Amino acid sequence: MSAAELLRTVATRFWRAMEGALPGLPPDLRVALAWRVEDGDMRWALSLLLAGWRLTDAREARASDVLQIDKQVGATALLGQINLLRTLDGFQLFVDRARDAQSDAQCKAAAVALVSAVERLDRTQLSLLVELLRRSDVREMGQVLIRRFPTPGSDRPPVWGTPPSPSSPSRGAMFDRADYAPRERALRSRQPAVPGGVVAEEMNEASSVENPVLDEHAVTVAFLHSLGHSEADIARLMAGPRGRTA
């Protein structure tokens, strides 16, 4: 099995585990995972990111080969931030179970672990997790990954593309910045999560927002602060995943 085949296989396990967990997840998170990304959705994009992160663990036999794929599609910049999720109580158990979930029973066990991990989040942590999935750079990287690895069951052939340029934001990214800037400011004020059903209403109000700013780094740092990390820990975690080489 090639590294690309391994990545797709493990990503499919994550995808199935998250599907099994959907009924037990909060509405906001379910909505976020269902957002359209390329010809797939955020659940498949996140599955590819999680598989790419897990398979570059130093314990993995094909870690260096999978890391090359991550580099080819430009995903390495997000690996360090995905690595932050390991600090969430119960998340590592979900990742380990999903990585090896070959049977229905194993898939259900991974789904239960994910629901349990999400239930342990407080309101602020849940809001920050949803906002992470809404970020324009996460969505754009999801588009690149889904072009390379079509959604399970799709008949579309893989499309090899180049990573999006951060200096030239797409129209979708610019829309995101206008749409979600008010929610970013609310998160920095530690406000409760906004129900997913409000998203459509916010989209209609986006045109009235003046000088929107999406401070993605601040959101990530706020997430770490909410977990109780010191400034030194945050600096180390933001530097990249442990046990990996560039």
Image: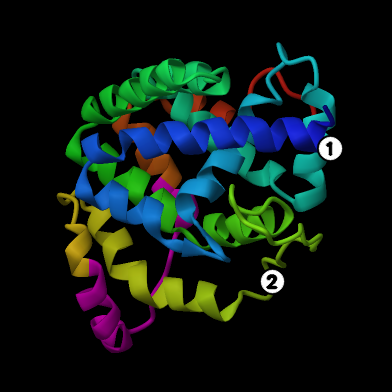
**Quadrant in which residue 62 is drawn:** top right
Q: Quadrant of residue 1?
A: top right
| Residue at numbered disc 1 | 68
Find the magenta span and give its range: 199-219
Q: Nearer the viewer, residue 205 or 8?
A: 8
Determine if residue 67 is in view.
no
Quarter of the picture holding the C terminus: top right
> Is residue 167 left or right of 27 when viewed as pictured?
right
The residue at 52%/20% (across/down) is: 101
Image point (76%, 57%), residue name: 158
Element type at marker 1? helix
Q: Is residue 127 found left or right of 135 in the rendered image?
A: left
Name the amino acid, label 1.
Gln
CA gap, disc 1 to disc 2?
23 Å
Pick the residue in front: 231 or 153.
153
Circle 2 is placed at which residue position? 167
- Sequence-first tag of 1 and 2: 1
